[in-house]
Image (cartoon, rainbow, N blue to C red):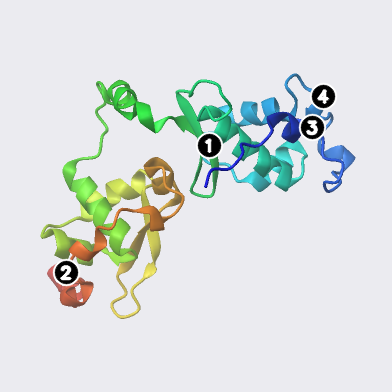
Amino acid sequence: MSQTPPDLDALSAPDADGPAVEADELAFDVDDLPGGALAALEAVLMVADEPIPAVRLASVLALPTDRVEGLLEALAAEYRGEHGGRMRGFELRHAGAGWRIYSASAFAEVVGRFVLEGQTSRLTQAALETLAVIAYRQPVTRGQVSGVRGVNVDGVVRTLTSRGLVAEAGSDPSTGAVLYETTGYFLERMGLASLDELPPLAPYLPDFDALEGVDMANRETR
């Protein structure tokens, strides 16, 4: 069922019923700026290099969180062309723990050509395969990932860790081996709000019960 797009003008207007904001939080009222609160929100989003939670945006703008959430939804709809305007080449998406402006998915191919042209730091096939195993079977040890791929992955895991895509997540209680999981940055790069949005690939990966003892074996061979 389709919903009526939010009224941007109404959302941009000050909310008399919203929670009061401390006077010293901001030296001015964002509603008095050119374009009002909506434009101020866009300005902040344009310089964000990671998804920003609505609560943080509300704090920066000195506005009630529920009003900021409404503004975010309205902007996202406007960028999709739902208010009668043209579709933009960018979109506002909720990814990871917050909101960020991305190039629109419809233009992924042309943007990809621009980004990847001449790029030398792309992940190797081995790194992509290792990342996939960690993403679908996390938390996992390097030995378990090696058992799935059939090769040593120590160097690849270090690369993924240095790029912020995976991180240590404690240790296996039975073997003491370090466990790894994907990070919020991984979700951001994938454009996902949570791991639940990953395509259903996990059933095709081997059960880790069949790899019992790989961490001990790897430890013995080092």
Identify the element where label 1 is drawn.
Answer: strand
Among the two numbered marks 3 and 2 on one chain, the one whose residue lies closer to the N terminus? 3
| Residue depicted at x 34% and y 53% | 198
Among the two numbered marks 3 and 4 on one chain, the one whose residue lies closer to the N terminus? 3
Which residue is labeled 1 in the image?
A: 100
Q: Amino acid at mark 4?
A: Asp
Q: Which mark is residue 32?
A: 4
Query: Is 51 placed above or below 144 here?
Result: above
Which residue is labeled 2 in the image?
A: 218
**Residue 219: which quarter of the image?**
bottom left
Identify the element where label 3 is drawn.
Answer: loop
Query: Is 198 placed above or below 123 here?
Result: below
Q: Are marks 3 and 4 in contact (CB under 8 Å)?
A: no
Among the two numbered marks 2 and 4 on one chain, the one whose residue lies closer to the N terminus? 4
Identify the element where label 4 is drawn.
Answer: helix
Q: Quadrant of the C terminus?
A: bottom left
Q: Nearer the viewer, mark 2 or mark 1?
A: 1
Determine crowd level at label 3: few under 14, some 14-19, many 20+ residues with C-alpha closer than 10 A.
Answer: few
Instruction: Report the Cα–Cα distance between label 3 and label 1.
Output: 23 Å
Nearer to the camera, 39 or 219: 39
Q: Is residue 159 left or right of residue 211?
A: right
Q: Nearer the viewer, mark 3 or mark 1?
A: 3
Image coordinates for residue 162, horizontal then vertical, percent: 35, 45
Q: Amino acid at mark 3?
A: Ala
Q: Are marks 4 and 1 in contact (CB under 8 Å)?
A: no
Q: Which mark is residue 13?
A: 3
Judged from this view, the residue extending furthest toward the bottom is: 174
Determine crowd level at label 4: few under 14, some 14-19, many 20+ residues with C-alpha closer than 10 A.
Answer: few
Instruction: Report the Cα–Cα distance between label 4 and label 1.
Output: 24 Å
Q: Nearer the viewer, mark 3 or mark 2?
A: 3
Determine crowd level at label 2: few under 14, some 14-19, many 20+ residues with C-alpha closer than 10 A.
Answer: some
